Image (cartoon, rainbow, N blue to C red):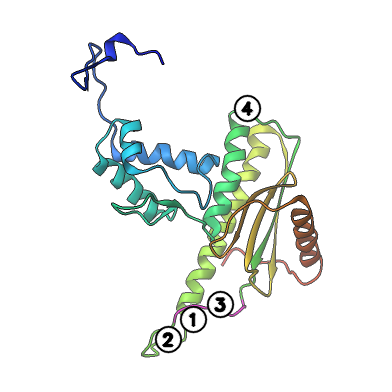
Amino acid sequence: MVVDPEYAPVNGRKRSQRPQHPQRTHREVADELRARIRSGELSAGRRMPTQARLAGEFGVERGTVRQALRSLQSERLLGNVSKGAPATVAVCLTAMSLTLAIGEPLRQIHAGRLKPAKVDVRVLLPGRDIDLAFPVAVEGRDDGHAVHERWLSMRNAQGQVLRHDPLALRATHGIDVRVSFRALPSTPPVKLYLLNGTEVLFAFGQGTGTRDATFVEQSRLWFDALRGTISSEPVLTD
């Protein structure tokens, strides 16, 4: 190990003749951690470094780290943020995890690190008329219709974003991009994302991990079978 003389410890404390940089804010810490989650460096289901370790890495107080983690928790990127055990990167069974999975390749394309000739995005969505386990007011003031409509509105809005971002590559990079959605009369209990035939994310409840090639291939065949048989064209405008 080589120690820079300017940073050699004196009586157990470090001294430095270099000018001190302003301490990072919790927003800056959150931005960096969010980028690591989006890039896959911090993958779904993985425990975060301890708050003490993050405080040391970023040169901030633990309170600043805690604020950053709680900010990411409010975005549903983290769970179990407390003063005790390290937080966990959320296994997010919502459109957010798909947005993150697609977002990183898009950033690499815009940065010039990926140069695909073609991009084909295919997504299966829950149909608008299926019965979902939405909560209903105990007093029966409504039958869950308002909650269902809110979910449908969110599904449609998120679908529009997922469609818009890849399609924008046509104008900016001249890439042949195709984005298609199909609706199912059910909600599958598992989530599997494939990028060029390679698993990006898998989740069943709170389980994570990497499946073997046979599982991934059979899942792709299952997807194609549903898409080609019982799925229908969804409406994402209302």
Q: Which residue is mark 2?
A: 142
Three-letter amino acid code of the residue under disc 2? Asp
Q: Which mark is residue 132?
A: 3
Circle 2 crowding by C-alpha within 10 Å: few under 14, some 14–19, many from 20: few
Magenta-drawn stretch contains 133: yes
Q: Earlier in the sequence, mark 3 or mark 2?
A: 3
Q: Are marks 1 and 4 in contact (CB under 8 Å)?
A: no
Instruction: Tell which circle, 4 or 3, labels the residue nearer the N-terminal end.
Output: 4
Quarter of image, res 235: bottom right
What is the spatial separation of the Cα atoms under label 1 and label 4, in whole angstroms?
Answer: 46 Å
- The crowding category of the residue bearing disc 3, from other C-alpha atoms within 10 Å (few below 14, some 14 to 19, many at least 20), is few
Residue 126 lies in what quarter of the image?
bottom right
Local secondary structure at mark 1:
helix
C-alpha distance separating marks 4 and 3: 42 Å
Q: Which mark is residue 112?
A: 4
* Nearer the observer, 221 or 229: 221
Q: Which residues are magenta?
A: 129-135
